Image: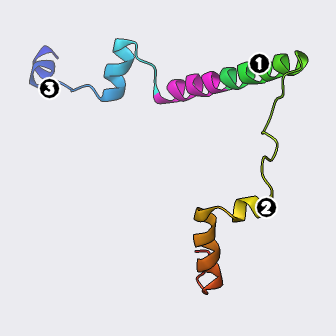
Amino acid sequence: MLRDLRRMQAKGLSKIEVDVLAGEPSQIEQLIAENKRAFMRSQAIKTGMKRANNWGQHVGRPSIGESVEEFLAKPSSQRVVAALNGGLSLR
């Protein structure tokens, strides 16, 4: 039996086996940890927004600062309007 063991070639370890021996987390463990961090961040943001709302601070998107006419009067908007009037498509 010892003779057979000596004749066998040494087996190389796969990356997964090396990571397990080194104590590294697997891909699924990394994914779970990443999802947990994202959830905790989301909860912290929601808590901060709720706290700001309780203090009377505005939370959410800003109110519209300009009318449609004012927006379309801008030079950059004029180029787009001219292109659309010239028959160019949105794409």
Q: Are marks 1 and 3 in contact (CB under 8 Å)?
A: no
Q: Are marks 2 and 3 in contact (CB under 8 Å)?
A: no
Image position of 26 (left or right of 40): left
Is 25 rendered above or below residue 65?
Answer: above
**From the image, which quarter does the C terminus lie in?**
bottom right
- Residue 20 lies, in percent from the top left, at 39, 18
Q: Earlier in the sequence, mark 2 or mark 3?
A: 3
The residue under label 2 is 68
Which residue range is magenta in the image?
Answer: 27-38
Q: Earlier in the sequence, mark 1 or mark 2?
A: 1
Q: Residues within 10 Å of mark 3 (few under 14, many from 20)?
A: few
- Residue 56 lies, in percent from the top left, at 89, 20
The residue under label 1 is 48
Is 34 rendered above or below residue 71?
Answer: above
Image position of 27 (left or right of 57): left
Is 61 rendered above or below residue 70?
Answer: above
SS for tag 2?
Answer: helix
The residues bearing labels 1 and 3 have C-alpha atoms spaced at a distance of 62 Å
The residues bearing labels 2 and 3 have C-alpha atoms spaced at a distance of 79 Å
Is 83 rendered above or below residue 77?
Answer: below
The front one of 11 and 48 is 48
